[in-house]
Image (cartoon, coloured by chain):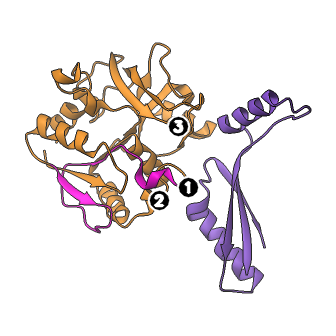
């Protein structure tokens, strides 16, 4: 089964890269952009077809490696 | 003082650390490759600067999960002194041996220059050769040195004098909270710092103000 994991900075954590992108969008004259936060996407293929098992494995993977839970949140999409 | 230097693929300040340890202690450190599972019994283990695994995923994240780290944890539990410089600091936070995280510099630039540090706590095995509050020059060279921790962690660090070095006189180069440049663990045996004291230990470097970190450790050994 295929899964997509999205890792984003927690609310309140400064995102200088997101701020720089906002600045670039402004330079490109895009209007109406309130804010940009940069994150990471991981596409993971698993042996199992069991959603519960996949979610359990992916949660462990996120907590141990893919996300630094001091500064980041993660979301698992199956 | 017996010491060991851990080397990861992408470490590039390892020779600087090796040289500093040799000059100050008169003994060559043992070199331990990241895939080894045993670190020899030494007084001090150093994680050097560099870009382990090309900073993939997050700076220090992959190195922190490498085979040598379980023995580093064992040494940490026994109270062996552990120093992480720059990427070494990032690895120690990723490994959970130090709290918080080093994020992308607030100004987004890679900073490579000399800053001023204040010895915020000169009563540690890493800083006892400095005077309390002493301000000295130290080089920095990093892209991800912006220290972040939640409010409760920061309060605990400050309340227990675990901030060893702080950027002084407005020279904070990266946006670190509370101007934090170096912190230690609860027991004062593990320290991480972003600046490079190993690059100011001989007159040829243009100064010796970084030497105190190593002479402090030598005295404590």
Task: Please give the residue where the numbered disc 2 appears in the rendered image.
Answer: B62
Query: Mark 2 and mark 1 in contact (Cβ < 8 Å)?
Result: yes
| Secondary structure under the numbered disc 3 in the rendered image | helix
Tell me the element at label 1. loop
Q: Chain A is drawn in which colour?
A: purple
Q: Are marks 3 and 2 in contact (CB under 8 Å)?
A: no
Question: Percent from the top left, x then y, of residue A73?
Answer: 70, 54
Lateral position of residue B192 relative to residue A6, left or right: left
- Mark 1 highlights which residue? B57
Chain B: drawing colour: orange
For this orientation, the residue located farthest to the front is A28
Q: Mark 3 points at which residue?
A: B156
* Segment tinted magenta in the rendering: B29-56
The chain under label 1 reads B
Residue for point 32% across, 67% down: B35
Q: Tell which residue pokes out farthest to the left in this image.
A: B26
Secondary element at tag 2: loop
Q: Residues within 10 Å of mark 2 (few under 14, many from 20)?
A: many
Residue at image location 67% in from the left, 77% down from the top = A45
- Viewer-side residue, B12 vs A71: B12
Residue A50 visible in rendering: yes
Give the mark nearer the N terminus: 1 vs 2: 1
Q: How far apart are marks 1 and 3 (CA)?
A: 28 Å
Task: State left or right for residue B113 relative to residue B44.
Answer: right
């Amino acid at each position: 089964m295929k899964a997509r994991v999205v890792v984003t900075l927690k609310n309140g954590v400064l995102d200088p890269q997101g701020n720089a992108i906002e600045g670039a969008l402004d330079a490109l004259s895009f209007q109406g952009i309130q804010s940009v936060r940069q994150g990471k996407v991981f596409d993971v293929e698993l042996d199992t077809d069991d959603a519960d098992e996949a979610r359990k494995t992916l949660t462990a993977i996120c907590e141990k490696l893919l996300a630094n839970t001091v500064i980041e949140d993660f979301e698992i999409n199956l | 003082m017996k010491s060991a230097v851990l080397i990861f693929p992408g470490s590039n300040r390892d020779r600087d650390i090796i040289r500093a340890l040799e000059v100050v202690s008169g003994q060559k450190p043992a070199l331990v490759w990241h895939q080894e599972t045993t670190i020899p019994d030494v007084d001090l283990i150093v994680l050097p600067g560099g870009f382990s695994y090309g900073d993939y995923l997050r700076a220090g994240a992959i190195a922190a999960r490498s085979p040598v780290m379980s023995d580093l944890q064992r040494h940490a539990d026994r109270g062996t002194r552990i120093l992480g410089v720059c990427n070494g600091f990032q690895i120690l936070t990723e490994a959970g041996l130090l709290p918080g995280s080093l994020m992308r510099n607030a100004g987004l630039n890679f900073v490579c220059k000399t800053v001023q540090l204040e010895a915020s706590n000169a009563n540690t095995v890493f800083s006892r050769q400095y005077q309390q509050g002493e301000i000295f020059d130290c080089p920095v060279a990093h892209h991800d040195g912006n220290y972040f921790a939640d409010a409760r962690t920061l309060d605990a660090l400050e309340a227990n004098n675990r901030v060893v070095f702080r950027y002084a006189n407005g020279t904070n180069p990266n946006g670190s909270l509370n101007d934090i440049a170096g912190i230690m663990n609860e027991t004062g045996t593990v320290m991480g710092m972003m600046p490079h004291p190993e690059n100011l230990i001989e007159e040829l470097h243009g100064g010796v103000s970084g030497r105190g970190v190593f002479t402090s450790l030598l005295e404590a050994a």
